[in-house]
């Protein structure tokens, strides 16, 4: 078993290697003057069970191409099996056509990975579960829910409510509510036309409770901000907790991170958070132990299903 990682999240790669008591494999990655990517593995991988850790986070296209180049190099070096460990799967939100003449880029990325030579995918909280069906190779889909459940259980919060900030987060919010034995609320956000004002509806009892909002991705923070406004307007306590597996943190997200009605934001380290975005209210939960256990089980041909819940 050999573990390598690209340049997208080397600290996570090192953590995973440490959890496995392995040295992180040596690979040289550089950019040519014209921007092309070069990769060379500095040790033999012939016949080995190889794991490549590379989230395809921003800059998405750079990191995706780097992963493809690494996989191609491994295939041509006769690696026995290549598992792409993709803690954050870029383009997962483009999982279906919303209008005519649009691509399904999530499927295109799956095709590219398989064409490059990937034998297996290990992912963490795909934004759309149907992404698994885009592959003709095995996909192990891990969940960060146990990390958030343990983090919140330690808080011993007074009366709280788990909230799905939009209808796409209902499933993950329901699972967290069950684990914490808390009530569930859903915020439905709709726009009836391109020029219409967004309507927000809160379903569930939130008055006097601390809201715990959970989603897979926090990008611009728009949905979270709208949900928080609606929850506070319905009497929820202005002491919220916001949990998201992937801290994409794009565009105007700083406004959401600076809100006074949020106690803490909790993210995994699937994506490195820039130092300028870090505040005392951001908590990073390491996904390295979870990924390492899954990788070990895959290598030993043992069950990974116990890690899915």
Image (cartoon, rainbow, N blue to C red):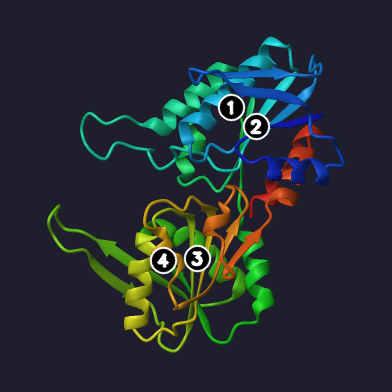
Q: Position of residue 308 (x, y in %)?
A: 64, 50
Residue shown at 80% from the left, 21% from the top: 48
Q: For the residues labelled 1 and 2, say whether their Cβ atoms are less than 8 Å apart.
A: yes
Give the mark nearer the N terminus: 3 vs 2. Answer: 2
What's the distance in space between the residues labelled 3 and 2, CA to CA? 35 Å
Q: Is residue 270 above or below residue 169?
A: above
What residue did someone put label 2 on?
Answer: 6
* Quadrant position of residue 309: bottom right
What's the distance in space between the residues labelled 3 and 4, CA to CA? 24 Å
Residue shown at 64% from the left, 29% from the top: 120
Nearer to the camera, 275 or 122: 275
What's the distance in space between the residues labelled 4 and 1, CA to CA? 32 Å
Helix, strand or loop under label 1: helix
What residue did someone put label 3 on?
Answer: 174
Q: Position of residue 274 (x, y in %)?
A: 56, 51
Give the mark nearer the N terminus: 3 vs 4. Answer: 3
State the mark number for residue 67.
1
What's the distance in space between the residues labelled 3 and 1, CA to CA? 34 Å
Query: Is the residue marked by circle 3 packed among few (<14), some (14-19), or many (20+) residues within 10 Å?
Result: some
Q: Position of residue 307 (x, y in %)?
A: 69, 50
């Amino acid at each position: 078993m050999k573990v390598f990682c690209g340049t997208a999240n080397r600290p996570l790669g090192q953590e995973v290697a440490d959890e496995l008591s392995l040295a992180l494999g040596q690979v040289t990655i550089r950019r040519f003057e014209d921007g092309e990517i070069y990769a060379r593995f500095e040790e033999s991988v012939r016949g080995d069970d190889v794991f490549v850790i590379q989230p395809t986070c921003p800059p998405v296209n750079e990191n995706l191409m780097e992963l493809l180049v690494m996989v191609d190099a491994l295939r041509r070096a006769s690696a026995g099996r290549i598992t792409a460990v993709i803690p954050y799967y870029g383009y997962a939100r483009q999982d279906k056509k919303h209008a005519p003449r649009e691509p399904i880029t999530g499927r295109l990325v799956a095709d590219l990975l398989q064409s490059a030579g990937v034998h297996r995918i290990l992912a963490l909280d795909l934004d759309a579960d149907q992404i698994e069906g885009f592959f003709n190779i095995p996909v192990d889909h891990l969940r960060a829910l146990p990390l958030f459940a343990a983090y919140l259980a330690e808080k011993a919060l007074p009366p709280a409510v788990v909230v799905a900030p939009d209808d796409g987060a209902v499933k993950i919010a329901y699972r967290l509510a069950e684990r914490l034995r808390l009530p569930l609320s859903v915020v439905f956000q709709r726009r009836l036309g391109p020029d219409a004002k967004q309507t927000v509806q809160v379903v569930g009892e939130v008055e006097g409770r601390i809201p715990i909002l959970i989603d897979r991705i926090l990008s611009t923070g728009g949905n979270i901000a709208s949900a928080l406004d609606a929850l506070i307007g319905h009497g929820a306590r202005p002491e919220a907790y916001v949990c998201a597996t992937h801290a994409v943190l794009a565009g105007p997200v700083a406004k959401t991170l600076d809100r006074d009605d949020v106690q803490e934001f909790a993210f995994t380290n699937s994506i490195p958070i820039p130092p300028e975005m870090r505040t005392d209210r951001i908590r990073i939960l390491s996904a390295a132990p979870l990924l390492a256990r899954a990788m070990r089980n895959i290598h030993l041909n043992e069950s990974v299903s116990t890690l899915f819940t």
